[in-house]
Image (spheres, helix red, strand yellow):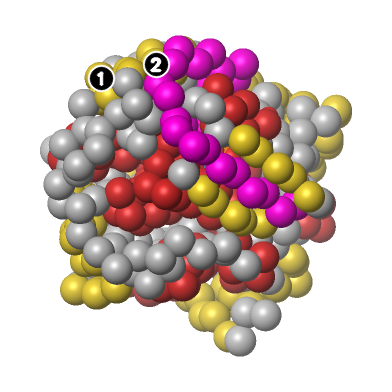
């Protein structure tokens, strides 16, 4: 188990470069299986979730070559094998192998984790989508065997605009005969990222990024080239850090349109920033106002920034309320925030109250999930004294080279196994 140790309250200045988006990369890598034989993916983040995925790709006999921040994936000798539980339960995004192996071979066998620390997170919308396309789904405990003599395109309505299900059904629809239309699709940037990769391979897709996506089943695909979009959640996390400790801190490689909800909220609470091209410059704000935040699907306020934002609001003047509408258990970080001196109160499964400003004091804390860990990391950076974060591997799942990046802008931070 790794532990991050922080001596807090240092002024952070200089430049930090945003890495490729975890939630795009974990879909693009399995999608490479659909290419004729070889695909290149640029700007792949160095995070542990990618390593888990590559283990599965190698199990399926795909050849992976690393070249700087790119991956060259050769799937010409791919073998469809049951994916063992110990590999597929390590991360939720292993579910993308369902869509690609169904499209490529008409069969996939994989174990899938149940809930996690932030909620039940079922995959019923994915499964219903596969069945609508003509697949047969057998579930024994958490082992899924999905087969299809022939996938046939059709119009599918999503009861909820699930990011994962939108991508998974888009992937499966590539192998279907005819046209598939997804209504009430998710519109997150990662959908557009994956669609652009498939279009590059020769798949006709229209409407990615909107509520209605049309996919033409395509037999013979070309090879694909794509670039992972910059990580909008990593961008938001460093912007929040800059608002708390920055001195002209530069965050390079952002896409403004992907973080509008956060930027509007920061302006509303008095935080100033400047954007030139793909670089945002921000300094510590001494008079942060309290606010009300409701997490929503894109382009609303992203649930993945809810926990980092909670830490920022411990420094706001007055009472803030956060309503978490995506997950039913995403306030676990507040237990340790309160032990550091914050005053937060879980009012209900999806409502949190935060009173500030409060001086935080360093202490030993435990990360419970990826973004909860990020919330504690930010708290350690602003706290007086030393903070030790146990289970820091959660943080390494979604923040590439986080220790190196923080050190490069002046943080006093170390990681030890
Ligand atoms: C993706 O998860 C992200 N993960 C999550 O980021 C992110 O929080 C989420 O999208 C929302 O933006 C990856 O992309 C790997 P959903 P996903 O399907 O696809 C319910 C992070 O910190 N739901 O849009 O699983 C589900 O329970 C992670 O980077 C169903 O009920 O999200 C949840 O309440 C955390 N049935 C809501 O929808 C389904 O079949 C959102 O889920 C699918 C989802």
According to the picture, the residue beneath numbered tag 2 turns out to be: 181
Spot occupied by residue 280 in the image (x, y as percentages of width and height): 26, 42
Instruction: Give the residue number, with chain letter if any, for mark 1.
Output: 206
Q: Which residue does the image show at 21% across and 26% down from the upper left?
A: 204
Residue at (74, 66) in percent of width and height: 366
As helix, strand or loop, the secondary structure at mark 1 comes to strand
Chain-order first, disc 1 or disc 2: 2
Snapshot quadrant of residue 376? bottom right
Q: Tell me the magenta residue range.
A: 142-171
The residues bearing labels 1 and 2 have C-alpha atoms spaced at a distance of: 9 Å
**Residue 296 visible within the image:** no
Query: Where in the figure is residue 332, as x and y percent of width and height?
Result: 77, 48
Residue 109 sits in quarter: bottom right
Q: Is mark 2 within 8 Å of ligand 1?
A: no
Q: Where the N terminus falls, by quadrant?
A: bottom right
* Callout 1 crowding tier (Cα within 10 Å): few <14, some 14–19, many ≥20: some
Quadrant hosting ligand 1: top right
Q: Is residue 143 magenta?
A: yes
Magenta stretch holds residue 397: no
Any part of residue 40 in sight: yes
Give whichever of 206, 135 is nearer the camera: 135
Q: Quadrant of the C terminus?
A: bottom right
Q: Name the one closer to the observer, 66 or 117.
A: 66
Residue that appears at 77% across and 57% down = 336
Q: Residues within 10 Å of mark 2 (few under 14, many from 20)?
A: many
Q: Residue 289 in the image: state x and y as whole percent.
A: 56, 27
Q: Of all residues shown, which one is farthest toward the front?
A: 149
């Amino acid at each position: 188990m790794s532990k991050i140790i922080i001596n807090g309250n240092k002024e952070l200045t200089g430049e930090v470069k945003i890495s490729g988006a975890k939630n795009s990369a974990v879909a693009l890598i399995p999608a490479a299986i659909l290419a004729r034989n070889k695909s290149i993916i640029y700007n792949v983040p160095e995070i542990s979730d990618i390593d888990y995925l590559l283990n599965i790709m190698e199990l399926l006999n795909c050849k992976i070559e690393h070249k700087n921040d790119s991956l060259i994936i050769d799937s010409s000798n791919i073998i469809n094998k049951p994916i063992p539980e110990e590999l597929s339960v390590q991360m939720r995004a292993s579910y993308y192998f369902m869509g690609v192996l169904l499209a490529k071979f008409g069969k996939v066998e994989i174990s899938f984790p149940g809930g996690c620390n932030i909620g039940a997170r079922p995959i019923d919308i994915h499964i219903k989508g596969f069945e609508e396309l003509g697949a047969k789904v057998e579930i024994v405990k958490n082992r899924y065997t999905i087969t299809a003599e022939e996938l046939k395109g059709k119009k599918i309505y999503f009861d909820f605009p699930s990011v994962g299900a939108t991508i998974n059904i888009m992937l499966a629809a590539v192998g279907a005969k005819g046209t598939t239309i997804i209504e009430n699709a998710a519109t997150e940037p990662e959908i557009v990222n994956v669609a652009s990769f498939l279009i590059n391979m020769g798949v006709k897709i229209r409407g990615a990024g909107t509520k209605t996506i049309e996919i033409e089943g395509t037999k013979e695909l070309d090879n694909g080239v794509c670039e992972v979009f910059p990580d909008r959640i990593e961008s938001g996390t460093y912007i929040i850090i800059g608002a708390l400790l920055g001195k002209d801190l530069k965050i390079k490689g952002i896409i403004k349109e992907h973080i509008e909800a956060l930027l509007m909220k920061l302006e509303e609470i008095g935080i100033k920033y400047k954007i030139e091209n793909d670089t945002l410059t921000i300094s510590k704000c001494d008079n942060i106002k309290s606010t009300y935040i409701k997490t929503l699907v894109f382009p609303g306020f992203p649930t993945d920034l809810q926990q980092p934002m909670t830490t920022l609001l411990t420094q706001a003047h007055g009472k803030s309320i956060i309503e978490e509408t995506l997950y039913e258990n995403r306030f676990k970080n507040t237990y340790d925030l309160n032990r550091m001196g914050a005053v937060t109160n879980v009012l209900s499964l999806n409502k949190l109250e935060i009173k500030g400003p409060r001086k935080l004091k360093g202490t030993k804390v435990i990360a419970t999930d990826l973004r909860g860990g990020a919330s504690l990391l930010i708290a350690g950076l602003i706290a007086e004294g030393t903070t030790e974060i146990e289970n820091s591997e959660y943080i390494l799942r979604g923040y590439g080279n986080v220790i190196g990046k923080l050190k490069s802008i002046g943080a006093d931070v170390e990681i030890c196994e």
